C-alpha cells in the first residue's frame, strides 16, 4: 500500500513535469517574440489592468493556502475542516475566473482580441485611448509596422492565460467532485493521496500564474 | 546454417496450457474493456496496433503502386499527397511510437522487474482508450477527405494553404500524444518503485533500460508536440499569428518546436526496439550481453543527446550557419552510443553458441539494416551533403532503414520471441524463418534503390517523376510486394498458432529473464509469489544451476 501511495505521488510529479514542457512551448514563443517586437510588446502590456492582475494573483495564492490547509485537514482527519477548505478553494478559483472574465471583456470592448476586428488604434494613436494614456503618458505612437505586432502580443496573452484558465476549469471541476466525496466522509480516513496529489496540481497551476503575471503584466512597465 | 536449436519444449503428449492464466481468468467483453491487467491491455494494444499497421501498410502499397509509372495515373496528385500523409501520420503516431512500448513493454515490463502489474493500472487502461479515440479520430479524418500536409504539418502550408482536415488530424495526434505520455509516465514510475527485492538497477534486463530511456523522451518531448499542435489548430481556427509571417509570427519557430519533439520521437521509436535486440541476441548466443553497463548507459545517452540535435531537420530552412555547425557535430555524436550498441551486440555474438531461430534472424536483419540506416544518417548530418540529399528519396530510404528495417524488424523479433510466453504456444518455426528472410529481402529491394534515386536527385512527395527513374522505382515497388507478403505471413501463421501451435512450456528458449521463470501464459498476478533476485541479468549459469535443482528435487 505504501508503495502504491509512493508511486502515485511520483507519477503526479512526472505529470507536472510534462505540464511544464507543455507550457514551456508557449513561454518560449512569448519570450522570442517579446525580444523581436519589444516596443509593441511593452505598449501592449500597458493595456493590461495591473489592479485586476494583482488582485487575481492574491486570490490564487490564497486559494493555494486554503488548498494546503485542506491537505493538512485531510491528514488530521478533520472532515468539516476539509470540506470548508475545499469549498473555499473552489470559490476562490471561481473568483479568479470571474476576474479573468472582466479582463477579457475589457479587451473585447477595445477590439484587442486577435482575429475579431482587431484594432491597433490604441498603439498608433495613444491619445485616443485616454484611460491608458493618462497612466502612461510617455508611451509614444508606434509606426503601423510595429503596432500591428501588438496583435501577436494579445494572441499569446490569450493563448497563455486561456490555457491557464482551462487548467483552472479542470481543477475546479475536480474540486467539485472532491467536495461531494469529502462530505460523504472520504479522504479523512487515512487515504489522503488523492487530496495530496490534487494539491500538487493546484499549486502547479498557481505557479504557472506566478510566472505569467510578471511576464505579461509587470516586466518593463516603465520602459 | 546450423540446425542446432536451443528450443526445449515439454512433451507434447502430456503438456497442457495451464488452466488458470491471464487469458482464461475472466471471460466476456467487459472483463477485457475494464481490465487493469497489463498483459490484457498489452493484448488490446497489440490487436489495435496491428490494425493500424495494416491501414498504414495498405496506404504504403498505394504509394508504391502509383510510383510504378512516371506519370501520375493511378491517382491524382492531390490524392497522392493525402495518401502519403496519412501513411506517415498513421505509421508514426499510431504504430511506431506505441509499437514496442505499448505492446511488448506493457506485457513484459512488470514481469521483467518481478512486479505484479504496472504502478498505475488504471492510467494504463486510460492510455489505451486515448489511443483508440485518437485512432477513431484519425479514421474519421481519413474518411472525410484526409489531410495532405505531410506528417510534419508544416506551416504555413497546414495553416493557410490547404483546406483538408488539418484540425481533426492535429487533434488526433494530440490525443495519441497523451496516450504515449501516460505509457511513459507509467513505465518510469514502475521501474523506480516496483522492482522486486534484489532487483537493483544494474540487474535490470536491457529491455527495461531502453524502455526507461524511451519513457523519459515520451514524458519530456510529447507535451511540446502537444502545444505546437494546439498552436497550429488555433492558427487555423482563429488566425492567432504565432506562426504567420504576415502577422509577425515565425514559421521557423514551428519547425523548432515540432522537431524538438519529433526528433526525440525517432528515438522513442527505436530505443525499445534496441531493448528487444539485446534480449534476443543474448538468448540465442547463450552469453551475457557484452558490456552490459555500456549498453545500458548508451540508451540513456541516446535519450539525452536526442534533445540537442533537432535542428538537423532544418539545415536548409534558413537557420544560422553557426548553429548548423553545432547541431551537425552534436548529431554525429549520436552515432557514438548507437555504435556502442551495435559493437556490443557483435561482441556478444563472438564465441557465443549461436542458434538461428526466427527472433534471431530478425535481430540479424535489425543489426544490418539499422547500421546502414544509422550510417546514412551521418551523410545527412554533414551540412554539405545534406543540402544535396535532403528532401530527396535518400532521406526516405534513410528513415525507412531505421524505422522499418530497424524498428519493425525489432518488433517482429520481439513478437516471435515472446509469443510463446504470451499465448503459451509456439509459432511454426520453418514458415516464420521464411517470413523473416522474405522481409529482409523485400525490404532491401524496396528501399535500397531509393538511396540511389535520392542521390540521382529524385525529390520525395511527388506523384510523378522523370522517366529515367522508372527502373529503380519498379525495383522498389516489386520489393514492396515481397515485403507486403513478408508482413502478411506472420499475421496468418501467428493467428493459426493460437490454436494449433505446439505447447511452449514456461521457458522454451532457456532464457534467463524473470518473465521466463513463470508459466506461459502467465498468471494474472504474474508470479505465484514475488521473486527475490540474487543474480545479474543474462546469467546462464544461474539458470543451469536452477534447472538442476528442480530436476534433482523433482
Image (spheres, rainbow, N blue to C red):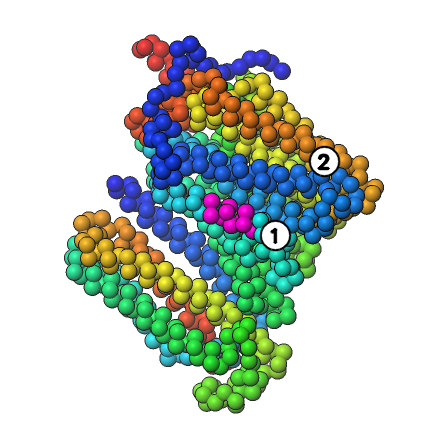
| Position of B202 relative to B171 (above/below) | above
The prevailing secondary structure element of the residues shown in magenta is helix
Q: Position of residue A76 (x, y in %)?
A: 17, 55
| Position of B38 relative to B167 (above/below) | above
Residue nearer the viewer, A28 or A194: A194
Q: Is residue B207 magenta?
A: no
Seen at 29% across and 69% down, the residue is A92
Q: Position of residue B398 (x, y in %)?
A: 67, 41
Q: Position of residue A151 (x, y in %)?
A: 55, 74
Q: Chain of mark 2?
A: B
Toward which corner of the image does residue B183 lie, by quadrant?
A: top left
Name the secondary structure under disc 2.
helix
Residue nearer the viewer, B41 or B216: B41
Disc number for residue B145? 1
Disc number for residue B550? none
- Do the residues marked 2 and 1 share a common chain? yes
Q: First in sequence: mark 2 or mark 1?
A: 1
Q: Is residue A166 left or right of residue B273?
A: left
| Position of B51 relative to A138 (above/below) | above
Seen at 64% across and 37% down, the residue is B401
- Which-is-in-front pick, marks 2 and 1? 1
Q: Which residue is mark 2?
A: B477
Visible in this render: residue B29?
yes
Residue nearer the viewer, A138 or B528: B528
Q: Position of residue B214 (x, y in %)?
A: 49, 42
Visible in this render: residue A69?
no
Seen at 53% across and 14% down, the residue is B5
Name the secondary structure under disc 1.
loop
Q: Is residue B408 left or right of residue A212?
A: right
| Position of B161 relative to B492 (above/below) | below
Range drawn in magenta: B132-141
Amino acid at each position: 500500500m505504501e508503495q502504491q501511495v509512493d508511486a502515485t505521488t511520483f507519477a503526479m510529479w512526472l505529470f507536472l513535469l510534462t505540464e511544464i514542457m507543455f507550457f514551456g512551448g508557449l513561454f518560449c514563443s512569448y519570450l522570442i517574440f517579446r525580444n523581436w517586437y519589444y516596443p509593441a510588446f511593452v505598449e501592449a502590456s500597458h493595456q493590461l489592468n495591473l489592479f485586476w492582475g494583482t488582485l487575481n494573483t492574491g486570490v490564487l495564492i490564497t486559494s493555494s493556502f486554503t488548498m494546503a490547509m485542506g491537505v493538512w485537514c485531510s491528514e488530521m482527519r478533520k472532515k468539516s475542516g476539509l470540506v470548508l477548505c475545499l469549498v473555499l478553494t473552489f470559490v476562490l478559483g471561481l473568483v479568479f475566473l470571474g476576474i479573468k472574465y472582466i479582463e477579457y471583456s475589457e479587451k473585447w470592448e477595445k477590439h484587442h482580441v486577435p482575429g475579431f476586428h482587431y484594432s491597433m488604434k490604441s498603439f498608433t494613436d495613444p491619445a485616443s485611448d485616454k484611460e491608458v494614456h493618462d497612466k502612461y503618458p510617455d508611451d509614444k505612437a508606434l509606426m503601423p509596422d510595429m503596432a500591428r505586432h501588438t496583435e501577436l502580443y494579445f494572441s499569446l496573452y490569450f493563448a497563455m492565460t486561456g490555457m491557464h484558465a482551462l487548467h483552472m476549469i479542470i481543477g475546479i471541476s475536480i474540486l467539485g467532485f472532491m467536495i461531494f466525496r469529502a462530505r460523504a466522509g472520504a479522504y479523512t480516513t487515512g487515504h489522503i493521496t488523492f487530496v495530496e496529489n490534487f494539491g500538487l496540481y493546484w499549486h502547479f497551476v498557481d505557479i504557472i500564474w506566478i510566472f505569467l503575471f510578471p511576464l505579461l503584466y509587470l516586466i518593463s512597465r516603465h520602459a | 546454417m546450423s540446425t542446432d536449436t536451443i528450443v526445449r519444449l515439454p512433451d507434447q503428449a502430456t503438456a497442457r496450457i495451464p488452466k488458470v492464466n491471464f487469458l482464461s481468468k475472466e471471460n466476456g467483453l467487459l472483463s477485457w474493456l475494464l481490465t487493469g491487467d497489463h498483459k490484457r491491455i498489452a493484448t488490446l494494444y497489440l490487436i489495435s496496433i496491428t490494425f493500424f499497421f495494416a491501414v498504414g501498410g495498405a496506404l504504403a502499397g498505394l504509394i508504391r503502386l502509383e510510383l510504378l509509372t512516371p506519370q501520375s495515373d493511378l491517382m491524382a496528385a492531390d490524392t497522392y499527397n493525402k495518401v502519403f500523409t496519412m501513411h506517415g501520420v498513421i505509421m508514426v503516431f499510431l504504430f511506431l511510437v506505441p509499437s514496442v512500448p505499448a505492446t511488448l513493454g506493457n506485457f513484459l515490463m512488470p514481469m521483467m522487474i518481478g512486479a505484479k502489474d504496472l504502478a498505475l493500472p488504471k492510467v494504463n487502461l486510460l492510455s489505451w482508450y486515448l489511443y483508440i479515440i485518437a485512432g477513431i479520430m484519425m479514421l474519421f479524418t481519413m474518411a472525410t477527405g484526409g489531410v495532405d500536409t505531410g506528417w510534419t504539418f508544416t506551416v504555413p502550408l497546414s495553416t493557410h494553404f490547404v483546406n483538408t482536415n488539418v484540425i481533426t488530424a492535429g487533434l488526433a495526434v494530440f490525443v495519441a500524444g497523451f496516450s504515449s505520455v501516460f505509457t511513459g509516465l507509467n513505465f518510469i514510475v514502475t521501474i523506480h518503485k516496483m522492482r522486486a527485492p534484489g532487483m537493483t538497477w544494474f540487474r535490470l534486463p536491457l529491455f527495461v533500460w531502453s524502455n526507461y530511456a524511451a519513457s523519459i523522451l515520451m514524458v519530456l518531448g510529447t507535451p511540446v508536440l502537444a502545444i505546437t499542435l494546439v498552436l497550429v489548430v488555433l492558427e487555423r481556427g482563429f488566425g492567432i499569428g504565432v506562426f504567420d509571417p504576415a502577422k509577425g509570427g515565425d514559421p521557423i519557430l514551428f519547425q523548432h518546436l515540432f522537431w524538438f519533439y519529433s526528433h526525440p520521437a525517432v528515438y522513442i521509436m527505436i530505443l525499445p526496439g534496441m531493448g528487444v535486440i539485446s534480449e534476443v541476441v543474448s538468448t540465442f548466443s547463450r552469453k551475457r550481453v557484452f558490456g552490459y553497463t555500456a549498453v545500458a548507459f548508451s540508451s540513456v545517452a541516446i535519450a539525452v543527446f536526442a534533445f540537442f540535435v533537432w535542428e538537423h531537420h532544418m539545415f536548409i530552412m534558413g537557420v544560422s550557419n553557426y548553429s548548423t555547425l553545432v547541431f551537425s557535430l552534436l548529431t554525429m555524436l549520436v552515432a557514438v552510443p548507437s555504435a556502442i550498441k551495435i559493437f556490443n551486440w557483435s561482441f556478444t555474438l563472438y564465441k557465443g553458441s549461436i542458434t538461428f531461430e526466427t527472433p534471431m534472424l530478425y535481430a540479424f536483419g535489425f543489426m544490418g539494416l539499422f547500421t546502414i540506416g544509422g550510417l546514412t544518417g551521418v551523410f545527412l548530418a554533414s551540412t554539405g551533403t545534406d543540402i544535396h540529399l535532403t528532401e530527396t528519396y535518400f532521406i526516405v530510404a534513410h528513415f525507412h532503414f531505421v524505422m522499418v528495417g530497424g524498428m519493425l524488424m525489432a518488433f517482429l523479433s520481439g513478437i516471435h520471441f515472446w509469443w510463446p510466453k504470451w499465448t503459451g504456444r509456439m509459432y511454426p518455426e520453418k514458415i516464420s524463418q521464411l517470413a523473416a528472410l522474405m522481409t529482409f529481402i523485400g525490404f532491401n529491394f524496396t528501399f535500397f534503390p531509393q538511396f540511389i534515386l535520392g542521390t540521382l536527385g529524385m525529390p520525395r512527395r511527388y506523384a510523378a517523376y522523370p522517366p529515367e527513374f522508372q527502373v529503380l522505382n519498379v525495383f522498389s515497388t516489386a520489393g514492396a510486394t515481397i515485403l507486403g507478403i513478408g508482413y502478411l505471413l506472420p499475421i496468418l501463421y501467428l493467428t493459426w498458432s493460437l490454436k494449433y501451435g505446439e505447447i511452449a512450456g514456461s521457458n522454451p528458449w532457456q532464457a534467463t529473464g524473470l518473465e521466463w521463470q513463470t508459466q506461459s501464459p502467465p498468471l494474472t498476478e504474474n508470479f505465484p509469489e514475488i521473486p527475490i533476485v540474487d543474480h545479474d541479468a543474462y546469467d546462464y549459469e544461474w539458470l543451469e544451476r536452477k534447472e538442476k535443482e528442480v530436476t534433482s528435487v523433482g
